[in-house]
Image: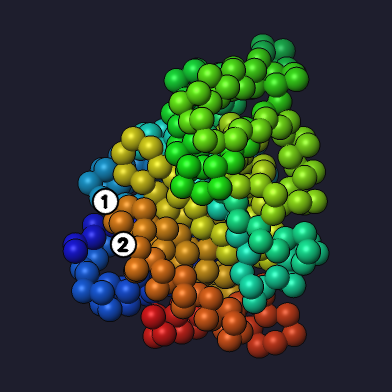
Amino acid sequence: MKLNIALLAGDGIGPEVIDQAVKVSDAIAKKFGHEIAWTPALTGAAAIDAVGEPYPDSTHEVCMAADAVLFGAIGHPRYDNDPKAKVRPEQGLLKMRKKLGLFANVRPTFTFPSLIDSSPLKRERIEGTDMIILRELTGGIYFGERGRLDDGNTAFDTCTYTRAEIQRLAKLGFEMAMTRSKRLCCVDKANVLETSRLWRETVQDMEKDYPEVKVSYEFVDAVAMRLVQWPNTYDVMITENLFGDILTDEASVISGSMGLMPSASVGVHTSLYEPIHGSYPQAAGKDIANPLATVLSAAMMFEDAFKLKDEAEAIRTVVNKSLAEGIVTEDLAGKNKAYKTSEVGDWLAKNV
Ligand code: IPM
Ligand code: MN
């Protein structure tokens, strides 16, 4: 099979972790007889530096023409402490999500047997955790009207959702629940917010189309708490953009390191695969970042975008093997030897 993949490395550790995912994917392609054509394109601060724009049209064209997008990370400290910056790397990410119609962000949280004791949570609380948060990605407060009043001292951001936006995300949630334990948790703040009440009403209306799925409705504050108490009681969760942003960061460390969890963003056009972690600027260029989240994102890409399940499984198997044998970066090494980002990538590619 010929695989056409857009490669958006982005900022910070993005290029380093992407390099490892490319090595591993190329090794998989060789083993299974596929041919991958990688097309690199600029995004984030790197794109601002080069062409003044974080998601240039030329990059969008590359993404639209590809079968899948593999993405590193976006963000640069130069912009973080400058609230007056006119262009920001993150705007590129939002523009990309909007233009590619990526309305659903699929963020799994699972545990690795060999890492159970690296989790900040106790073993008995996390054993068996295997959940997916489906975060709405192109609506809500991220994309609502925002601004300052003339006095300069008053600011606002608005959260808007349409029934149709909620339905298309919830539909994915119901379908995903049907392939798993048939439990779906709708997370909102319906005791306060009108948008949340529309979420709840819309999902309740859809229940009749999926009689086998048992839906629970929980408030986001309670979920934030239960996620650290009983993560293994959740299965598929659906939620709006900002709640999903916060809860997925919380969920991502349950496995033991933020550098482990992959994600997929799907919707209208080309799907995108990326690690959950950010650009981790402190580590950029040091060859120390954990590449596994990006490597596992490539596995999600093989499975979802190309329906190549065996290839995806082969990646997951070699990743588990590296963890079991302690071929890990410093975030997981503890007192043992820490391998470099590139060494982990080389080992994985060789052992595929
Ligand atoms: C994420 C990130 C982005 C978001 C930022 C970088 C705009 O935190 O992908 O979760 O808030 O969506
Ligand atoms: Mn986030």
Write the residue at 67% across / 80% down.
333
Instruction: State left or right for residue 120 relative to residue 40.
Output: right
User: Which three-letter amino acid code belongs to the residue tagged 1?
Assistant: Asp
Residue 46 shows in this picture: no
Write the residue at 70% across / 64% down.
127
Nearer to me, 92 or 262: 262
User: Which three-letter amino acid code belongs to the residue tagged 2?
Assistant: Leu
Residue 67: x and y in percent read 26, 51
Instruction: State left or right for residue 92 relative to residue 243.
Output: left
How are the residues colored?
rainbow
Question: Which structural element holds mark 1?
Answer: loop
Q: Cβ(mark 1) to ligand 1 < 8 Å?
A: no
Residue 248: x and y in percent read 63, 47
From the image, tell me which residue sits under label 1: 67
From the image, tell me which residue sits under label 2: 308
Question: Which structural element holds mark 2?
Answer: loop
Q: Total number of numbered labels? A: 2
Instruction: State left or right for residue 12 relative to residue 338.
Output: left
